[in-house]
Image (cartoon, rainbow, N blue to C red):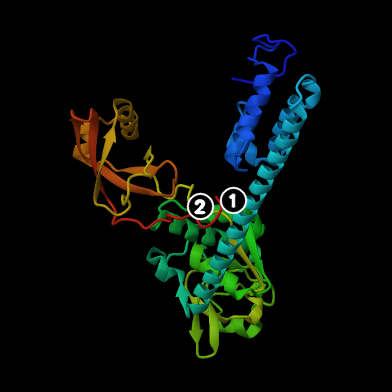
Amino acid sequence: MVYGISSSSSAETDNGTSVIKISMFLEEIQRRILLKEHTQENLLRLLQLVSPSITYSDLSNEEERIKAINKLLNQAHPSNFMDNIDAENIHVDMKAFCAKCCEQMQMKSSKKRLGRRKKQSKLQTSQENKAESVIQFNTRQKWSHLDGYVRPLPPEKLTSGKVLAPLVAYQCINARGAIAHGKRPSLVYSWENVESCRGISVMDVFKKHGGFKTISGSKVHDIKLEIIENGPVVSHSFIPTTSFATEHSKSIVPSRIKKHHYCMIIGWRLTEYGEAWLVQSYNGGEIMDIPVGRFSIDETIIAPKSSFVNLTWQQGPYFDRDMTLTKGWHNVEEITLKLSANELGKFAETFGDKDFSDAIIEKIRFVIRDKNKNAHSRSCSIQSLQWNKRQQVWDVTCLFNDKGSYPLLEQNLSI
């Protein structure tokens, strides 16, 4: 029932909404505010007298809430009820009721914001303590499939710095892609991608792939946290000296001596001289110790903004499926897919001209890919296919070809 104002007792207004007699309208207002607590729920019930479609979401929006309250106040204004001696008192009570409800909502919202801030503050303190307590850290140890993994690699020693920035940027992206994928990817950004970006900066490469974030001012804790949570980062400020370049001649591009020499930081360790960043050489041949704070190494750090969990890091063909509720599928040896007749038809397309018997006999490889997180995928082959009469579905049992994966399950970055 939608309540409206009418000078007559007609059952309908011009727009077709139902109306009730004036006295009933005021009585209903009284009923909905008298001895009622000043809660969001009671305010919603009151406003639904004239705005039946209003929701809790609308009520949370200050602009929508004020609009609905003003509509009620206008329709219940005493000037519309000249013959009712209680109209003015009801209007005053109703206005006060709405004001107190709004006040309570604002207080509740403020408490929630304060709670979130406290929670964020505790989390930040916890994270800082976490970084503080870690004496040494190497992304290759946390994500063991990164051990010895650097892609792409240049075909020869670099003499020009024009491809150094895109090379290091794509090495960082591929490393983080491997983290998202949970194992070494078979589909990566290649040297051809580097060559196509010749002359552009690390930031520009990251911009093409979801954006970047910057940690400036040698904030060691922030840099450590980023590496612990999300993987390698790129130093945009490292300036090698002549003596450092001589000591690490195979890892330093000659034209970048005493200039910004972009490099990927994969962790840190405690040496006899203090803390040092673990810096991966661009050619994959060396991990250099560079003391924290030296050579401007940590003045400007660039990191990808994306987690790359929505990118595919494995070669197909693919069978896309929502794997959200299939717990533990990343590490089992086999899996049985429950497919409807329609889904089985789409599954058959994965094998092209081959039928299911050929796919089983020949152990034709394909990839199960989570359609919600494309980075989560595993290669497998069909072991058996049979009709499940009880459940009225096709049971497709698949054997995985790998030893499992350990993908990024909780996204620490915006996608």
Q: Residue at x 49, y 76 (%)?
A: 287
Describe the element under mark 2 as helix, strand or loop. Answer: loop
Q: Which residue is mark 1?
A: 210
Q: Can I make out residue 188 in this image? A: yes
Q: Residue at x 55, y 73 (%)?
A: 128
Q: State whether residue 41 is above or below residue 246.
A: above
Q: Residue 171: give x, y in percent of width and height.
A: 52, 61
Spot the residue most to the bottom: 272
Describe the element under mark 1 as helix, strand or loop. Answer: loop
Q: State whether residue 397 is above or below residue 400.
A: above
Q: Amino acid at mark 2?
A: Phe
Q: Residue 109: give x, y in percent of width and height.
A: 63, 51
Q: Residue 88: give x, y in percent of width and height.
A: 77, 30
Q: Residue at x 50, y 54 (%)?
A: 190
Q: Which residue is mark 2?
A: 308
The residues bearing labels 2 and 1 have C-alpha atoms spaced at a distance of 8 Å
Q: Residues within 10 Å of mark 2 (few under 14, many from 20)?
A: many
* 183 vs 42, nearest the viewer: 42
**Quarter where residue 11 is shown:** top right
| Quarter the N terminus occupies | top right
Q: Residue 7: give x, y in percent of width and height.
A: 75, 13
* 211 vs 199, nearest the viewer: 211
**Quarter where residue 60 is shown:** top right
Q: Residues within 10 Å of mark 1 (few under 14, many from 20)?
A: some
Task: Specify which label sits upstream in the sequence, 2 or 1.
Answer: 1
Spot the residue most to the top: 10
Q: Can I make out residue 282 in this image? A: no
